[in-house]
Every structure is written in C-alpha cells, then in structure tokens.
C-alpha cells in the first residue's frame, strides 16, 4: 500500500493493473479496526488510507473540469469506500472528505449522494466526526459546497469538543464564513453557531478576527467597517460570562489592529477588555503602531485597562507609550489614569 501511494503520481501505462492492485489491498481484512481518537493520523497511516491517497493522486494526474463526473473506472471504487456498512473504509472516507471540494466540483451528484451524507451528525456521530476531521485537515470556504452542507457545518459547532486538534480549524472557518456570509448563511444562523462554541472555541474565534483584520492590509478601514463591526454587533456573543484573560487579550489585539478605527474599536469592545497579566506584547504593538501619538486619549484609556495593578513586570515600552501620549497631548499629564500608571512604574522600578 505504501508503494502504491508512492508510484501513483509517476507510473506510466497499465492503469488497469494499478486499479487491480488497489482493489486487492482494499479487500484484505486489516488488523487494528477504526481508531476514533485520531482519525486523520490513523487514516494516513493505514493501508486503506494509503490506497485511497494513491487513487486520489492517480486521479489528479488527469485534467479535471467542473461537472465532468468521476471516471467510470474510479467511481465504483470511491462509491464502495463511502459505504458506511464497511467499518475499515472509514479511513478512506476521512481522506475523501479532505478532498470533498474537488470531488464536489467534478461530480456534484456523486458527492451529494455518496460523500456528503457522512458529514451529517444526525446520521452517525462517529462517521461525522471522522469526516469533519478529514475536511478540517485543510479546509477552504467553497460556497457551492457550503450551500450543500450548511446545516451540518453549523451543527458542528455543537460538536466542537469532538473535533480533537482540528477544532481550531473549525472555529477559524466559522469566523471567516461569518465575516463574509454571502447568500449562504444568515447572520442569525451564524450567531447561534458561534454562541454554541465553548470558551476555547471563542478564543480561537477572537484570534481569527485579528488575523483577518491584520490581513486586510491597506483595506483595514473598510474591512473593519464592513466586516468586523457587523460581526461584533450581530454574531459575537453578548454574554460577558465568556470573558477570559485569553479572549480579552485577543480582543485587545483586535483594537490595535483596527488602526485608524482604534477609538471605535475600544468603544465597541471595552466591555470585553480586562487587565492582562503579561501586557508586554500588546504594549510593544501599541508603541510600534503609532496609536499613542495618533490617538493619545483613547490610547491612555486602553493602556489603563490592559495594565492592571496585578500585571507582571512592565516592559520599557510602557514608559515609552506614556511619553508618546503626553508628548502628543500635554493636558493628559494630570490625568488620573496616567498618574496611576506612572505610580505603577515607580513601584516596579523600586522593587
């Protein structure tokens, strides 16, 4: 099976012999059964997974076009691999799910009939977990496919803890879908799914928001206004019971990433911001962003929130931030927030 996987991209001629060998390996009763703890790792290291990967590599050697359908010599094999009654073929279904976008584009009817039902949690939780971990191995937001699996995708939020190490990918994908819902998702559906995430999922979601905004580069103002603000208003959970230090720190970073919309970001997220135990990275970002000079009063308000009396040893960036703030707005020298932060600095310098 390793050899078939290795030569699948390069052998010349004798396709029928290759397929015969693949069928023979698949017909063998393999030891070990189905490991539900690590479905992806188990699949890529199992003979059934090797053969499935070999068949996919062989298929990808052909020019693929949307709607051309699976070749007649391959479709029956893939159909058999999707038979839920054959437990050992779950390893194959994990890998086929990882390639579901390509399979859907080439043969939508086959994918809807044979592959996509395995993503449905209501049919089989074990099958769905394995299939979703395969899909989330390297996920992409392909709209036509998500039109077909929308209900299962949203339901996956309630099974977040079942996704193992792929749960972060799900939180990221849900966030990107919510930032650009198009006609596929309603905001109410996305809000329900996001609020169904556990605390860990919301933490990953907050980091995904930061990456999305930072990735907008010179379009940040428009992205903040048109994508992030609607997300925060209609999708992000309103309950403050979900506030954790990690989520608060990520949202503080989101404020900095907003750049020219920094004051608006603080206003929108203030209720979620808390003192950070180790604020060094945030202060370094503040200093490098120029926000202390551009928006001295909002910057002081922000730093006053994230640097609490219990925050750990301050970095030199805190003093530089305060100097930049007072240099840009001298009246803030007498501000009680600035005096508190200066006293905090003195205490630690003396200590």
Image (cartoon, grey):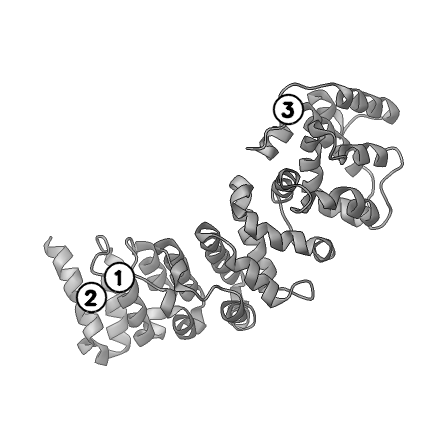
- Nearest the eye: 12 or 210: 210
Q: Is residue 281 depicted above or below 94 in this figure? A: below
State the image coordinates of residue 350 (x, y, percent, origin top left).
10, 55
Q: Which residue is mark 3?
A: 33
Residue behind mark 2: 341
Mark 1 is surrounded, within 10 Å at the Cα level, by few (under 14), some (14 to 19) or many (20 or more) other residues, namely many
Q: Earlier in the sequence, mark 3 or mark 1?
A: 3
Q: CA distance from mark 3 to mark 1?
A: 53 Å
Q: Position of residue 309 (x, y in %)?
A: 20, 60
Residue ID at (58%, 53%): 173
Q: Seen in the image, is 148 located left or right of residue 138?
A: right
Element carrying mark 2: helix
Query: Residue at 70% across / 58% down in the picture?
Result: 143
Q: Is residue 295 left or right of residue 123?
A: left
Res. 307 mark: 1
Question: Circles 3 and 1: CB distance less than 8 Å?
Answer: no
Q: Is residue 306 left or right of residue 115?
A: left
Q: Is residue 251 visible?
A: yes
x, y percentage for residue 59? Answer: 80, 36
Q: Is residue 347 above or below residue 31?
A: below
């Amino acid at each position: 099976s390793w050899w078939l996987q290795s030569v699948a991209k390069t052998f010349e001629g004798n396709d029928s012999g290759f397929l015969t060998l693949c069928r023979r390996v698949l017909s063998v009763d393999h030891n070990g059964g189905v490991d539900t703890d690590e479905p992806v790792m188990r699949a890529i290291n199992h003979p059934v997974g090797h053969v499935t990967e070999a068949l996919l590599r062989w298929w990808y050697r052909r020019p693929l076009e949307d709607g051309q359908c699976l070749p007649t010599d391959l479709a029956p094999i893939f159909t058999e691999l999707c038979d839920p009654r054959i437990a050992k073929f779950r390893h194959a279904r994990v890998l086929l799910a990882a390639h579901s976008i390509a399979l859907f584009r080439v043969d939508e009817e086959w994918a809807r009939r044979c592959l996509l039902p395995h993503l449905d949690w209501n049919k089989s939780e074990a099958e769905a977990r394995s299939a979703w971990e395969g899909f989330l191995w390297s996920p992409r937001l392909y709209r036509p496919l998500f039109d077909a699996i929308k209900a299962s995708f949203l339901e996956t939020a309630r099974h977040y803890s079942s996704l193992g190490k792929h749960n972060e990918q799900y939180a990221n994908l849900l966030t990107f879908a919510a930032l650009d819902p198009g006609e596929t998702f309603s905001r109410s559906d996305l809000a329900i799914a996001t609020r169904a995430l556990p605390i860990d999922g919301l933490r990953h979601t907050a980091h995904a928001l930061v990456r999305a905004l930072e990735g907008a580069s010179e379009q940040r103002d428009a992205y903040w206004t048109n994508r992030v603000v609607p997300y925060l208003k209609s999708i992000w959970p309103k309950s403050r019971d979900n506030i954790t230090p990690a989520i608060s720190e990520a949202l503080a970073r989101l404020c900095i990433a907003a750049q020219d919309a920094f004051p608006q970001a603080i206003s929108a997220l203030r209720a979620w911001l808390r003192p950070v135990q180790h604020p060094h990275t945030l202060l370094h970002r503040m200093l490098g962003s120029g926000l202390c000079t551009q928006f001295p009063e909002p910057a002081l308000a922000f730093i006053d929130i994230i640097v609490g009396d219990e925050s750990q040893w301050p970095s030199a960036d805190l003093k530089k931030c305060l100097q930049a703030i007072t240099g840009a707005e001298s009246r803030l020298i007498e501000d009680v927030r600035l005096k508190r932060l200066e006293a905090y600095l003195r205490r630690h310098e003396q200590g």
